[in-house]
Image (cartoon, rainbow, N blue to C red):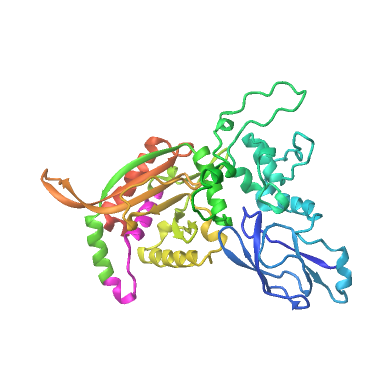
Amino acid sequence: MPTEILMPALSPTMEEGTLAKWLVKEGDSVSSGDLLAEIETDKATMEFEAVDEGVVGKLLVAEGSEGVQVNTPIAVLLDDGESADDIAAAAAPATAPEATNVADAGEEKSPAAAAERAVPPAPASADGTRIFASPLARRIAADKGLDLSAITGSGPRGRIVRADVEGASAAPAAPVKDSPATPAPAPAALAAAGPSTDVVLKTYADRAFEEVALDGMRKTIAARLTEAKQTIPHFYLRREVRLDALLKFRSQLNGQLAERGVKLSVNDFIIKACALALQAVPDANAVWAGDRILRLKPSDVAVAVAIEGGLFTPVLQDAEMKSLSALSAQMKDLATRARERKLAPHEYQGGSFAISNLGMMGIENFDAVINPPHGAILAVGAGIKKPVVGDDGELTVATVMSMTLSVDHRVIDGALGAELLAAIVANLENPIAMLA
């Protein structure tokens, strides 16, 4: 019997992807480890390797196909003695109507969905017509109090998928006919919905505009940030840092490291300062895990990197253990590959804390949105010369940088957040101590 090659789950949260390019053609012989295709997730393009050996009998999904569900058959591999005539019993293409159940089964088997509790049954609209929605989408919709009949699906043949329900505003579900009175919706279900696509298009019908389709990354950003602002109880702590000692020390170090081709940035010092602060205030080195808090032992610090059409937050693991020059080299490598969309999932997932630095773009201060499940994110502004009162009481000029710590109150209380921010400031204002 021919072997089906399934759409792989290239990250724990991946549910669908784009088959960007086939690296084999029908009739090619492949062995374990040979490259089969390039798969685009919402964050990166990755190469997919063969696990078995055989002959490529049929490619079931065309290059450029979007929204291919994890565990959906994408190709058929023939064993010795088999021919194309044996493929009839294999899975149909992902674009065929019969593939709906295969895709549903694939989502249930995906790493993200495997751990989920039982999903609600397939829903129907008021006129009895079945609403096509993935199991995970149905479960999330039930949790958020969403009426699936009011949501437009973006999956194959209009199927409602996870991104559709995560990006939708909660609203009370329509009551079932002849059922008892529907209870009052939970507070989260009372959020006002934004204007629909049709309303917005009509509003600007007499104005010139260009429609920009959302790619996978932008859809994910929209869904995750909406979720973050709706579900995470943010609060904000602000401090100013005097950078003169750090800038002087940085200049001295760069002079000594120049022959090695190393040039430290202020951001490298900020990463190190945050990593050490998380060790000094271990209760703040934590993430929210739904019904519990996970306190991490290493300082795994994520740093936001802007790319065309979105951003990545690559994670520097064990940052407290690394030298400034090692952090600098690793950050440069991660940033370069992030802009090329060449990061592997394990390089941008995880961490307990993040840094977003817009100071290099002239922004003096801002508030960053927490990237779940992180407990906090530090927004870093520009260093600006300002008049300050010195320790001797005299007016002087100093380079001052504004920082705002956005904190998840479920994970970190006010006093603990203030302690963490104070530790970060202390490290930056006494940079030599970070080398001890």
Residue located at (78% from left, 35% from top): 127
Majority secondary structure in the magenta region: helix
* Residue 321 quadrant: bottom left
Left or right of residue 222: residue 328: left
* Number of numbered discs overlaid on the protein picture: 0
Q: Say above or below: 142 vs 178.
A: below
**Do we see residue 65 in this rendering?**
yes
- Where residue 335 appears, as percent x and y from the top left, is 45, 64
272 part of magenta stretch: yes
Residue located at (49% from left, 40% from top): 229
- The residue positioned farthest toward the top in the image shown: 181
Left or right of residue 57: residue 136: left
What range of the chain is rendered magenta?
Answer: 256-279
**Do we see residue 288 in this rendering?**
no
* Residue 247 quadrant: bottom left
- Where residue 40 appears, as percent x and y from the top left, is 61, 63
Question: Relative to the observer, which residue lies in front, 399 or 158?
Answer: 158
Question: Relative to the observer, which residue lies in front, 300 or 55?
Answer: 55
Left or right of residue 30: residue 392: left
* Residue 227 quadrant: top right
- Where residue 93 appears, as percent x and y from the top left, is 78, 62
Left or right of residue 383: residue 277: right
- Where residue 362 appears, as percent x and y from the top left, is 31, 55
94 part of magenta stretch: no
Figure quadrant of the C terminus = bottom left
Figure quadrant of the N terminus = bottom right
